[in-house]
Image (cartoon, rainbow, N blue to C red):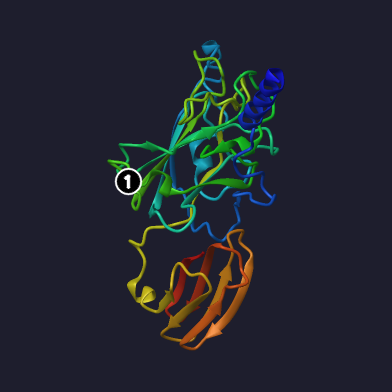
Amino acid sequence: MIKIVLVFATFILTTVSFSQSFAPPAGQVGSTAIHKDSVIILSWANNCSVTRGLADITNPSLGDASFGVAPNAVGIADGSSVISLGDGGEAILSFGTLITNGPGPDFVVFENSFSETFLELAFVEVSSDGVNFFRFPAISETQTTTQIGGFGSVDCRYLHNLAGKYKANYGTPFDLNDVAGVFGLNENAITHVKIIDAVGSIDPLYGTQDSQGNYVNDPFTTPFASSGFDLDAVGVINEGSLDLNEEIREQFSIFPNPTSDVVTIAVNSPTTFSIIDFKGQLIEKGFLEKEGVVNLTNHSAGVYIFKLSNSAGVFTSKLVKQ
């Protein structure tokens, strides 16, 4: 009886250790991957500065990673023009607008992995003053008993709040709710995003740890010019409103937000509207003279984009369906 209990307990512990806790690869049900062409991405980083890391932290004689240049990380993601950060290297990006803490994810980071399993990872930090940075609570549940080799595989379902979770052209989203309330950070006025390569070694001499003290195990070593995280782009989903024309803003009203069933759109002049889901798919469109009600009862809970256009201009708003 004792042996049976011990075996059963061991089975439970093993199952828990290797449970797949987080979102699956792009294209699968439940994935949080955002395609580079998604209409929820409103703008892109317009400046990038980089401090390279070594091509192989265990062999400094090889020098720093050298593939790509910093401007490759500016503008829209393309899956090919990147800058390689090297082991522990970092990039700081700035934007033409503030990033704010709105409904759903607030920005998205793109890497250029050629597959769903060759994943080179990075920590993400944000700042509201360009000086003090605060890290998202990254989690890696990948096993730490065996080192993943330089061309080894990583299962994204063990990863959370680590950039590089998805393959090229599909970005990893970050929600500022995860750092809301941190002293010294205004999560509604993010000015800079920092991407820091996670050295994928499980050797304490070189490795980097997640928010729970686990070593982040990813392909290591990669002693090449393209070593480390390959930064493609950072897209903004929830923008600040500093530059929004108030005349345009006053043309539209969408309420209630959040909603569980219907939403009312009020406009001051004839307006066309479209509703787009989180994946960038058009789910409804129409025309309003003054006010109309849109029924969302048959649509799934989540974040939707309302795009409205009339003679005053174009207005985009996010709506949460509960």
Asked whether 128 or 258 is in front, the reply is 258
**If the image is split into quadrants, where does the N terminus sit?**
top right
Q: Residue at x 46, y 52 (%)?
A: 106
Determine crowd level at label 1: few under 14, some 14-19, many 20+ residues with C-alpha closer than 10 A: few
Is there any visible trace of residue 304 in the rendered image?
Answer: yes
The residue tagged 1 is 181
Which residue is farthest bottom? 289
Where is residue 58 drawn, in percent x and y? 55, 12
Q: Is residue 164 above or below residue 59?
A: below
Q: Is residue 173 left or right of residue 185?
A: right
> Circle 1 sits in a helix, a strand or a loop, which is it?
loop
Asked whether 17 or 119 is in front, the reply is 17
Where is residue 245 drawn, in percent x and y? 35, 70
Q: Is residue 223 above or below residue 185?
A: above
Asked which quadrant contains residue 126, the reply is top left
Where is residue 284 drawn, in percent x and y? 61, 74
Asked whether 3 or 22 is in front, the reply is 3
Q: For the image shown, how many numbered marks are present on the structure?
A: 1
Q: Residue at x 56, y 63 (%)?
A: 301
* Amino acid type, label 1: Gly
Asked which quadrant contains residue 295, the reply is bottom right
Q: Is residue 204 above or below residue 68?
A: above
Where is residue 173 drawn, in percent x and y? 53, 47
Q: Residue at x 50, y 15 (%)?
A: 204
Q: Residue at x 58, y 36 (%)?
A: 159
Which residue is farthest left? 184
Q: Is residue 135 left or right of residue 10?
A: left
